[in-house]
Image: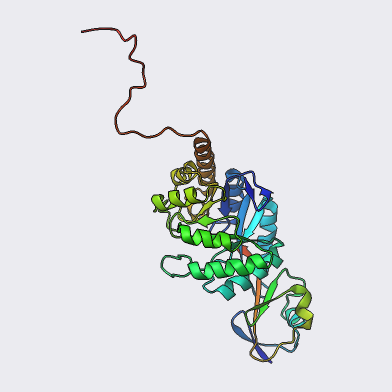
């Protein structure tokens, strides 16, 4: 899978938040096989040095880092956060979040496009956290985004793919654009479904970090992502309403 | 003078951003900075002079989803 010209071996991307401990995080990443980890920037007091400890931890994961602008509600806030993240993590990649609604954490589509354009002009490689809206997707591509990250469901809900029709339409409208289903997944079966639909990758955090056994769940998701991708590439059969016998009728013994 | 550091009113003696970072114990720390909501690259911290009431953000790498 190519994202902004970089070859990424795994189609599973994993967040680094909410794990019960650093060692559980490390083990979850190991068993997930994830090639990309999302990270953030946050305030720090002078003697705290929590940032340094976390930086050592993620560097040891040996994965590509995708910093986010989580929690930003305005274009300016998101742009400044992205600029700080680029310097801290030494990467032009940014998972752009411009949140427009507190209860659903739904992206603000207008601010998202504006921020995407500003950041692209500044040389960022923008991964916009977006909805399944095809018009918005077109605007983001027009603003310079080469990857889209539509939500499956609101962040942290674990509801899975709540608008299958919308996601299917989005996938079909832009078949050449790498798309990562980001947010809202709770179970491996939901990740498999996204992959079967032709999405290029999935990104999740809470589903793994908040599982009773995060490392086991990470491995479960890895298997599901792989299975779903194989199924997509294998060109699945068309469903039909009426039964069709799979065992040949020719040669059946005549026993009346 | 009194400035805002990460949202908290703080008295500092230094007046450039780089000197304030030093004074607050961030001398060799891996941080990124913004002043009054604008990003200040590390290389420019020495040229940014702070005024009373300025809002300084000091951030580091953290967990994210």
Looking at the rendering, in which quadrant would you find the C terminus of chain A?
Answer: top left
From the viewer's side, name the closer residue of A69 and B59: A69
The residue lying at 49 percent from left, 34 percent from top is: A235
Horizontal side of residue B10 vs B49, given as left or right: left
Q: Residue furthest left?
A: A256
Q: Is residue A114 above or below residue A14?
A: below
Would residue B52 be visible to someone looking at this image? yes
The residue lying at 44 percent from left, 70 percent from top is: A102
The residue lying at 52 percent from left, 59 percent from top is: A138
| Residue B16 percent coordinates (x, y) | 76, 85
**How many discs mark residues in the rendered view?**
0
Would residue A50 be visible to someone looking at this image? no
Q: Is residue A11 above or below residue A227?
A: below
Q: Is residue A5 above or below residue B55?
A: above
| Residue B36 percent coordinates (x, y) | 63, 83
Q: Quadrant of residue A117?
A: bottom right
From the viewer's side, name the closer residue of A170 and A91: A170
| Residue A220 percent coordinates (x, y) | 51, 42
Q: Quadrant of residue A82?
A: bottom right
From the viewer's side, name the closer residue of A64 and A116: A116
| Residue A162 percent coordinates (x, y) | 39, 53
Q: Is residue A110 above or below residue B55?
A: above
């Amino acid at each position: 899978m190519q994202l902004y010209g970089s070859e990424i071996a795994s189609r599973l991307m994993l967040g680094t938040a909410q794990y019960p401990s650093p060692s559980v995080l490390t083990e979850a990443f190991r068993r997930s096989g994830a090639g990309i980890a999302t990270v953030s920037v946050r305030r720090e007091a002078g003697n705290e040095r929590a940032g340094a400890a976390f930086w050592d931890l993620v560097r040891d994961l040996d994965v590509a880092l995708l910093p986010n602008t989580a929690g930003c509600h305005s274009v300016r806030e998101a742009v400044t956060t992205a600029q700080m993240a680029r310097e801290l993590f030494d990467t032009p990649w940014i998972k752009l979040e411009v949140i427009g609604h507190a209860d659903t954490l739904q992206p603000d589509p207008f601010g998202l496009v504006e921020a995407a354009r500003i950041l692209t002009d500044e040389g960022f490689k923008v991964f916009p956290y977006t909805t399944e809206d095809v018009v918005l997707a077109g605007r983001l591509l027009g603003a310079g985004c080469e990857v889209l990250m539509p939500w499956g469901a609101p962040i942290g809900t674990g509801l899975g793919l709540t608008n299958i029709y919308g996601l299917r339409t989005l996938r079909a409208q832009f078949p050449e654009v790498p798309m990562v289903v980001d947010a809202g997944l709770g179970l491996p079966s939901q990740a498999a479904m996204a992959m079967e639909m032709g999405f290029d990758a999935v990104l999740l955090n809470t589903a793994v970090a908040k599982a009773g056994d995060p490392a086991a769940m990470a491995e479960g998701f890895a298997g599901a992502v792989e299975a779903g991708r194989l199924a997509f590439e294998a060109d699945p059969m068309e469903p039909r309403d009426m039964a069709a016998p799979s065992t040949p009728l020719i040669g059946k013994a005549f026993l009346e | 003078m009194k400035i805002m550091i990460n949202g908290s009113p703080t008295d500092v003696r230094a007046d450039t951003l780089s000197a304030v970072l030093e004074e607050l114990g961030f001398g060799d720390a891996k941080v990124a900075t913004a002043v009054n909501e604008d990003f200040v690259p590390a290389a420019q911290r020495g040229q940014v002079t702070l005024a009373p009431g300025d809002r300084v953000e000091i951030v580091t790498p953290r967990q994210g989803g």
